Image (spheres, rainbow, N blue to C red):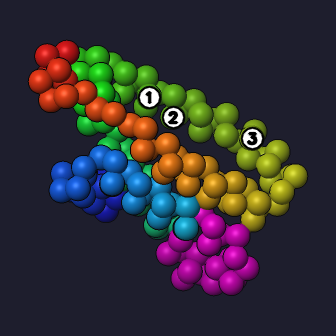
Amino acid sequence: AVGRGGGGSLSDVVGFRRTFLALASTQAVAAALYARPEVLASRPLFLLATCVLLACMGGHFALFPTACANTFGATDGAAIYSYLFTAFGIASIAAITLTKELQRRLGWAGVFRVFAVMSLASAGLSRAYQPLPPKTAARR
């Protein structure tokens, strides 16, 4: 709940791109912390990293309905978001196999390093996001 409410509120103040950048960057740091032995050895630090990751995930879920509407218009954006949400569920199932293979090859620390790098890459890609002009988004 903290992530969803916080992500949505922050986006209202500073906009989608800055909020996404903040969430993805924070997520990258928290994922990288999982690779640190002192975090794995400390229940409070592990809990903190886990809560931060889950808050970031909630924040992302708060951002994407608005981003879809701003990108594809209100009508198309709602339909596209439903596909995006469904794809997240399918990807979660597929991630089980990928995670097992990465864990076998890289160990858990490596899995979370890959997650951190992917989070940083998504933060970088957020610079390419271009919403529709407000009048165009409202008409669609």
Residue 17 location, x and y as percent? Answer: 34, 48
Q: What element carries label 3?
A: helix
Q: Where is residue 38 in the image (x, y as percent from the top left)?
A: 68, 84
- Dot 1, crowdedness within 10 Å: few (<14), some or many (≥20)? some
Q: What amino acid is labelled 2 in the image?
A: Phe
Whether residue 61 appears in this view of the structure is: yes
Mark 1 lies on residue? 84
Residue beneath the point at 44% across and 28% down: 84
Asked whether the beta carbons under mark 2 and mark 3 sit within 8 Å of each other, the answer is: no
Say which residue appears at 48% left-offset and 61% top-offset: 25
Nearer-the-camera pick, 18 or 65? 18
Q: Residue at x 75, y 39 (%)?
A: 97
Q: Using the numbered discs, state the Cα–Cα distance from disc 3 to disc 1 in whole angstroms.
A: 20 Å
Residue of label 3 = 98
**Among numbered discs 2 and 3, the one appearing first in the sequence:** 2
Percent x, y of residue 101: 82, 45
- Mark 2–mark 1 Cα distance, whole angstroms, equals 6 Å
Name the dominant secondary structure of the magenta segment.
helix
Residue 45 position within the rendered picture, expressed as x and y whole percent measured from the top left: 56, 80
Is residue 87 depicted above or below 13 in this figure?
Answer: above
Q: Which of marks 3 and 1 is nearer the N terminus?
A: 1
Q: Name the residue under label 2.
A: 88
Asked if the residues shown at circle 3 and circle 1 are in contact, with their CB atoms under 8 angstroms apart, the answer is no
Kindly identify which numbered label has been placed on residue 15: none
Gap between marks 2 and 3, in whole Å?
15 Å
Residue 33 versus residue 84 in the image, above or below: below
Which residues are the magenta region?
30-49
